[in-house]
Image (tube, rainbow, N blue to C red):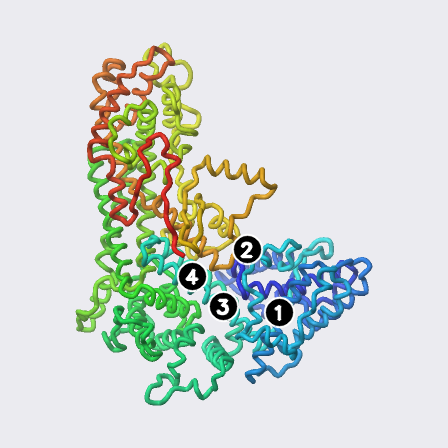
Amino acid sequence: MLPHSLYSVYQQYKLDTDAIASWLASTAQANGYPQELLQAGSDDPQKKTQAPSRRLKGKARLQAVREHRQNLAADKARLAQKKYTIAIKDFVALADFIYTKRATVGKVPISFVKTLDRVIRARRAFGSQIAETGEITDDAPDSSHMYFVSVLEKVRQVMEPLFPSQASQQQPPQGSADEKAKDAFSNRFAGLSVYESSEAYLNMPDKEPSQPAKIAVDNELEATYEAEKLNAYEDIIFALHALMNDLNRFRTRIEWIWDAYAQGLFDLCAAAIATNTAIELARNLMDEITPDLDAHGGAWKILQKFHLLLCMMDGHTPDELIGPDQESIGNFNYDFYDAGIGQFLQVYNMVDAFSRVIEPNQLPIYKEGMFGTYNPSSKRDTKSGLEKFYEDRALLMPFFTELMTVCVTVTDYPIEDEFLRGMAEMAKTRQTPFSMVFAAQVFLDIHHVLRTGVSRAFETFQSGATALRDEIEAHLEFHKTLKIDTWPRSNDQYMINISTDIRTVLKDPVYRAKERYYRRMNLTVPDSVEHNRILRMSPVLSGLMLFKYRAEVRDIALTVLNAWGSVTYTAHLFNALCREKLLSAQNTTAQPSWPDMAVLRSSILDDEQIFVGDAPSNANEYFTKFGLQIGTTINAFMKRKEKRKGPLASKAGPRGIKPEALSPVTSMFVDRYVRRTGSMNWTTEYVERVIEASQWEAEGSEEDNTLIMGRLTKGELARKKMQEKRDGKQKAKPAGKPARPTPDELIHSLILALNNESLEFAFPLLTMHRSCWRLLRAVKQQCDPVLRELFTPAYLERESELPFVVGWIFMAAATFETPPDMRPMLEAAKGVRQEVILGEGGMVAVRRLNELGFPISFKGEDDESFSSWKEERHQPT
């Protein structure tokens, strides 16, 4: 189930209905209505029947004891929040009782009136139109759709004298037979339009009515009230259409994402994560309605009726939906193929057909070309319905085999998306999960958007994964003899394992599994089956696979940076040289003196991570800030032993980079896709983090293609929060974002946040580490004669201590003990100029980013204002 902080059509309808029951029951009981007259819910532990007991022995007895204790704990939890189901027929009785207590009840909240009218309007409009088709199949009058409408109308009639003045002036929703109502809701299932995510409704200032109320019961327990669940045919169709509304919104958002990806505006990993998250959220929605569908014959049967109903509402007859014998497949008229896509009809049929040929632990052999050949160069919009069906079948069938190969023979495949997860579930249960059908339709939608561009996703993964592998191997070679005591061998082995895994995936374990399977059957894999077909056909799997390896390499790279101090200590030195104006005269280009460091400090690490606060601006601050960063005090650098008074080590210890402060939204998905912890539990906290925690702000608008995303520094974030606090007691809501976003609005916020963090997440930190270390070597070599003179040759005993050269340079320039000596600083500037300004070391990371699809441009050459430099990206409309 979705968290209440997300708005969906189906969930909002359910919450509205429960809110009406909750307000009636809680208000009535608060005014003396007998508790025993309220019907207890079906989940009341006291109503559960117990199975006959029999004496168990051994392990079975121990297991029974454990289960009994678990049941007691569960019953205790249920008792702590008792749930009552309010029968529909009791609504009027509750309203009558409340009216008799009108003196103490007072006025009805305006939010309750709005909720009541919203449900009446939606149900009546829907019921009227479904009745016109003749598809009413429910024979029980007290459980019918329109019966509930009549009950709600009676409640409104009884309660109307208690309505506040602004609600009393409103006309009640017109009767179902009224022509005005028919005109107002003439479009298909127009009653659902009242559940569109409008700003006026979502930010309604009245007390929110759509959360079931809790009141005290027996002075100990709390009670939650909900409406009796109707299971009539019309109610199932109503719920299904609400669900379809949400699912097709997801599809539209996903198509928007991949259209933007095709234009080069979204990173592959961001697009893949957002897409798979959308399918996960859709699964949560579908899980709510699946039991109701099963109670009425299953999803396939209801989808067929639903498709028939929609076509009849469009003026078609049932006979028109049956195709001519010579062209029809499955007795379906493919002139209605596009209409069926919105109800997932034919995709469900194809997935279900595949489920019937699955055998346990058997790999279904797909004969190449048996269902035609997909031609991405063809134009889909010129094809007939039957031709579109052939195209979709030619896409899905070979991919089904790829997924089954993973499920049966490559059980340790590194990544799993919702499509693969659905196939594993289907292979296990031999049933067709509705979520699997949705994932299959999304797979087709992406192909319809990208066409020939689908292969670009695999190429991006291939080049990105190869670059990560090369990064690791270059690092291991660089540190073949360069070691420190605090670096365990297990870290090197972890890096070797990542490199090995990348090589294995690039060699395609799925293809090799098929080779072994074919060999056992004395067959050979057809030449038409290309390597890495599963990744070539699925941009989502390609993106998730690349994200996994980016995350793993980034994790170990941050460990390297904290262990060696190469990047942060070099940043201290470079900051000092820039502040002292020792580099600017040598920079004749229209860009920062050290582009790699400019990008690092503006897009990845803020000053707090590097300098323990703001960047230092004078000689004494250079020294003290450096000491705090490495975890020492000034005493550690004193020349004479007698001056070393007090502790040498700082109480706080070395200050490393804090990974949890970087890429806050992207990091949420590391457990899901790297550690394989399963689907994300989309709590309210996670939703708010996606919307609020991303350290970027938008300027311009999507509508006119002027949207620019700029990263906020920590100081800018603090100033923004202070401004919000001054402007109002509560934190200001981000512009254009409703208080309760719909699931597809969450995906919109998510893709923007992920994309804006993509450069930060993909930055080649290991390359930067080696570049900084080479710079420290050049600085040490340049400064060595002067440092030996000032601090004796013992100032540096081995290369692993190279970062401390920065401390000796700062100590010479400081005024704590002796007159400052700027010679080491001047010599260091020469080394930096040779290595990163005049040499090739200044743009190693930027060039790598360009190769990975992250082009970097600079606005100016000011090395002192890194924090104000912003990456700008135009987002798609």
In the rendered view, does 289 fall on the left or right side of 792? right
Please tell me which residue is depicted at 30% across the width and 43% down the height of the picture. Answer: 856
Residue 255 in sight from this viewpoint: yes
Residue topped by disc 3: 245
Helix, strand or loop at label 3? It is helix
Helix, strand or loop at label 2? It is loop
Residue 362 in sight from this viewpoint: no
Q: Residues within 10 Å of mark 4 (few under 14, many from 20)?
A: some
Residue topped by disc 2: 740
In-front residue for pair 626/335: 335
Q: Quadrant of the C terminus?
A: bottom left
Q: Decide which of tag 4 and tag 1 comes sooner along the chain.
A: 1
As measured in the structure, the alpha-carbon distance from the residue carrying label 1 to the one carrying label 3 is 39 Å
Q: Residues within 10 Å of mark 3 (few under 14, many from 20)?
A: some
- Percent across and percent down for residue 675 are 37, 51
Helix, strand or loop at label 4? It is helix
Q: Amino acid at mark 1?
A: Thr
Question: Where is residue 764, by image quadrant?
Answer: top left
Q: Which mark is residue 768?
A: none
Q: Which mark is residue 253?
A: 4
Q: Decide which of tag 2 and tag 3 comes sooner along the chain.
A: 3
Q: Which mark is residue 49?
A: 1
As measured in the structure, the alpha-carbon distance from the residue carrying label 2 to the one carrying label 1 is 40 Å
